[in-house]
Structure formats: structure tokens, C-alpha cells
Image (spheres, rainbow, N blue to C red):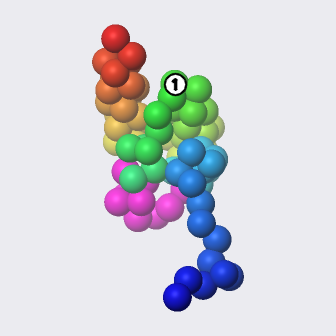
Amino acid sequence: MSNPDVQSTDASELSPEQRLKPANTRLINAGIVTIHDMEMLRACVAYENANQQRVPILRRLEERASEIRSQDD
């Protein structure tokens, strides 16, 4: 039986903060993997640069950008 009090969140509806704020790196990686467009990716890079500036996260975002670009070809 489903619980009507639990909200379902589509990954495309997550903000950069929601994708990158969790302390758990697995959740951050999941947030990055579910980025499917360059607009959201740029927003996430901007958020990370303005807030945490974690090099490993910025590298992962760079890798995801390369993946998105290769899919567009």
C-alpha cells in the first residue's frame, strides 16, 4: 500500500542545492548522474563554485559534462 504522505520527487526537478548539498557522497553522485542537460549542469557548477568548491565534485561535474556532450554528437 502506498503512503500518500510521502512525496515523490522526479530527479529532473531537483535544484543544484538538492543535488550537491547532501553529506553522503553516494547521494551527490546520484544527483550528478541524473543531470541530463547542460543548463542544469552549469547551474550545479555555479552552485558548487559559490558554496563548497569541492574539487572532487567539480571534477565529477566535468566528467558528466563530457558524457552529455558525447551523447549529443
Examine the image and state in which quarter residue 66 appears.
top left
Is residue 52 located in the magenta-colored stretch of the structure?
no
Q: 73 left or right of 22?
A: left
Task: Identify the secondary structure beneath mark 1.
Answer: helix
Give the side of residue 59 with respect to residue 5, left or right: left
Residue 22 in view in this figure: yes
Q: Position of residue 61 (x, y in %)?
A: 41, 34
Could you say which is closer to the camera, residue 56 or residue 1?
Answer: 1
**View extreme (front): residue:** 1
- Which range is magenta? 21-29
Label 1: how many Cα within 10 Å (few below 14, some 14–19, many 20+): some
Instruction: Estimate the x, y position of residue 5 in percent, counting from the top left.
Output: 68, 82
Q: Please tell me whether residue 71 is drawn above or below residue 47 in the rendered image.
A: above
**Amino acid, disc 1:** Met
- Which residue is at 37% across, 51% downward? 29
- Asked if residue 30 lies left or right of residue 3, the reply is left
Residue extending furthest toward the top = 73
Q: Residue furthest right?
A: 5
Decide which of 35, 63 is in the foreground and name it: 35
| Residue drawn at the location 62% of the way across and 78% of the way down | 6
What residue is at 58 percent from the left and 26 percent from the top?
39
How many discs appear? 1
Q: Is residue 49 visible?
A: no
Side (left or right) of 13 relative to 52: right
Label 1 belongs to which residue? 38
